[in-house]
Image: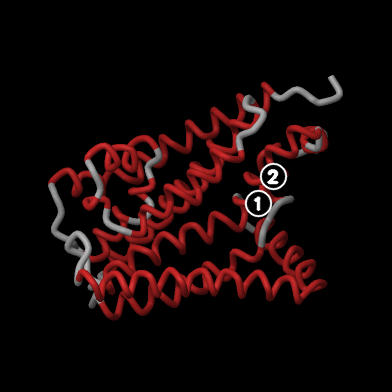
Amino acid sequence: MRLVLYQIKIRFKQAMVDRASFVNNLWIQFYAYMVTLLNLLLLLQAVGVVGGWNFNELLLLWAVNVFTYGISGIVIHAGCGNLERSVQNGEFDLVLTKPTGVFRYYMLSHINVTFIFHIVFSLALLTYTFIANHVVLTCGRLLYIFVLLFSAVVLQSCIMILLASTSFWIIKSSDIVNTAIYGLRGLCNYPITIYSAVLQFILLFIVPYAFISYVPATFILSKDISFLGQILIYIQPIFVALIALCTKFVWDKGVRNYSSTGH
């Protein structure tokens, strides 16, 4: 953790060299989130509730998604986005020469501090939605909320890593990564109960984004959901731990499968 914080500090100083570009990136993110917020507001004005969730509850669902994405994105996102290029042009060779873990070195060398805005924005939104939804917090509930959010951060990271790892076998994998990250992840801004049974199954067990926002949000809000839903709340940490082990296996196998462009 100390090394991660140190790298973030270094990257932030580097970003301040070109402050105009850094501020422009933050402004783009702010504009995008304001558009999303406006769309959500207009939708709720038209229909009242979505799948039994009101405006403030949907805001919390969205905030959990953004918050966990922001934390994982600082360390994971840029590295996953650049893996295809690094593998194709041989830059990944340099990573293999370092006297430290391949994964740790590669991800820490691609830290993206612009994701700090995601965290700050979502924390403000979470604070508002906790108050607006009158969320009851006891020591036990607060601890388990932390467990669920931590699991969601790990899951966000695992999904990005698993998809990016296809670069070790597939020449053009960026389309797969972008579709999953920017396409399917957007579905988690709404309760999965509004989708078809097939799509619910995909979001739960194929690309399990439902465990990122929907499952934690239902616990935080004490929503009345099905028996299966209650089970999902309490198996999430175990489920995510299994995915993390699978992710490590796929990444390690991909690294072993990697062949330098010079060979």
**Residue 192: horizontal and vertical position, in percent?**
27, 51
As shown in the figure, which amino acid type bears the numbered disc 1? Ala
Q: Which mark is residue 82?
A: 2
Q: At 73% from the left edge and 39% from the top edge, which residue is drawn?
A: 85
Asked if residue 189 lies left or right of residue 120, the reply is left
Disc 2: CA contacts within 10 A as few (<14), some (14-19) or many (>=20): some
Asked if residue 167 lies left or right of residue 18, the reply is left
Pointer 1 residue: 78
Give 41 or 161, whichever is nearer the viewer: 41
Q: Residue lying farthest front?
A: 46
Q: CA distance from mark 2 to mark 1?
A: 6 Å
Asked if residue 167 lies left or right of residue 218, the reply is right
As shown in the figure, which amino acid type bears the numbered disc 2? Asn
**Residue 72: horizontal and vertical position, in percent?**
54, 54
Asked if residue 148 lies left or right of residue 96, the reply is left
Q: Are marks 2 and 1 in contact (CB under 8 Å)?
A: yes
**Residue 27: horizontal and vertical position, in percent?**
61, 75
Q: Indicate the quadrant where residue 238 lies.
A: top left
Q: Is 51 located above or below residue 84 in the figure?
A: below
Q: At 13% from the left edge and 58% from the top edge, which residue is drawn?
A: 224
Disc 1: CA contacts within 10 A as few (<14), some (14-19) or many (>=20): some
Q: Which mark is residue 202?
A: none
Q: Indicate the quadrant where residue 252 lies.
A: top right
